[in-house]
Image (cartoon, helix red, strand yellow):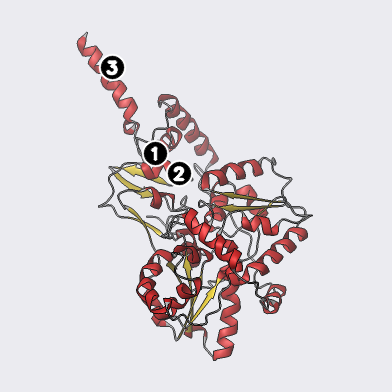
Amino acid sequence: MNNAENKYFHAIQILADNCTGCTACVRVCPTEAIRVRNRKAYIDPNRCIDCGNCVSTCQFHAIIPKSDPLDIINRFKYKVAIISSSYAGQFSEDISYGVAKQALYELGFDEVAEEAMVTDFMITMIREYIRANREKRPILSSNCPAVVRLIQVKFPSLLPNLFHQEAPMSILTRYLREKIAAERDLNEDELGIFLIVPCVAHVTAVHQPEGAYKHLQDGAFSIGMIYGKVREHLKKFQNNPAAIETFEKGLTWALSGVQAELVDTDDIRALSVNGIENVIEILSRVEDHYLDQYDYVVLRSCTNGCVGGCLNVENPFVAMSRIKKMIKDAPLKDINVNPLDELKKEGEFDVAPLSPRSIMELDPDIKKAIQKMKKINEFLIMLPGLNCSACGSPTCYALAEDIVHGKASIDDCVVLLKRHSKEEDSDDDL
């Protein structure tokens, strides 16, 4: 693997021994990052956006997510967990959110914070950003790391439209790191802050944050893994729950549609989109200026938002229903956002402009690139145009491109082979 391919960290891995070469993953990848050669799948790291479609699709568990092992928290004197809002929806209704949060302390964390704590602050910050950037329409949400990477790969012209502020869990991390270190007199290397996340894109974002000026978190754990570990502690607290404060009203961030509703006001029109195929369609329309009437577009790659992440354990519709009930039944709580406002004024939540991923370049030499394009078109004429993926490439165009790059052969096309075989049989009969 060359240096360019080593550039990107990914929270997905392929278990070659489990792979049957079925090409199901090839067909669902939104950026054509997966190929099957010699009956084994492989991922182009430059194209992969960690959306998790392949993880959810593979029936043979050949493509699996990666997250950090829990024991890395032991490297730190003081350990903090920040839980995604979707965590609350993973537990049956006889287990309160407070108990599910309390059980995390049994895993070794000294403090547990919630993404839900900063929801109201985020809504205010988004509105202010939209009003301050009237020349950009629409502003595109940047909370979903898979969508941010999708824009880098397929829609680079829209990068200036991204909301260039940190995501909620990173904002909370920045605040807690300063607050806890001061209160407990801790050195930087003594305080570990970890995210508990619903999808592989968030794991990737922790290890390789796009646009961040520095790494904020020390690791990321999948909700599924944490869920399995806290279950054994839940019964202990169900009948004797501690007085742990929770912020159910802020759990809206886990759900598709709610963020847009909260941002929407008399002078701001918002749109919410979820599901990677829908996101791609909307981004295409934004690129063509068909949706300039919107001020803000919330884009989530997973079904129903973060509750649909592949690292969750509960069905996204069931999880969404549970969270909506928690939000409805919860009392309002005042949260002091003054420290967050101060950090915002100091520019601590600013994100650097992102660069596109140059995956479409055929060759740095323009003459060679033109020649390669001609060869691609020549092969494309020969190919059947069925886009069946049986060759191991997602489309006939992708196969033609792979052939020109020396990564495939025209003989990989099963349809052409069958045609040639029938023609030869006919010739033999004559």
Q: Quadrant of residue 114?
A: bottom right
From the image, tell me which residue sits under label 2.
32
Q: Judging from the image, what secondary structure is the residue with disc 1 in?
A: loop
Foreground residue among 25 and 109: 109
Q: 334 above or below 430?
A: below
The answer to whether marks 1 and 2 mark residues whose Cβ atoms lie closer than 8 Å is yes
Q: CA distance from mark 3 to mark 2?
A: 32 Å
Binning the other alpha carbons within 10 Å of mark 2 as few (below 14), some (14 to 19) or many (20 upward) gives some
Foreground residue among 46 and 94: 94
- Please tell me which of labels 3 and 2 falls first in the chain: 2
Instruction: Note whether residue 4 is visible.
Output: yes
Q: CA distance from mark 1 to mark 2?
A: 8 Å
Q: Is residue 247 left or right of residue 32?
A: right
Foreground residue among 206 and 317: 317
Q: Quadrant of residue 342?
A: bottom right
Picture mark count = 3
Q: Residue 407, labelled with which disc?
A: none
Percent position of residue 54, x then y: 40, 49
Q: Is residue 249 left or right of residue 28?
A: right
Question: Label 1 is placed on what type of residue?
Answer: Ser
Residue furthest out toward the top: 430
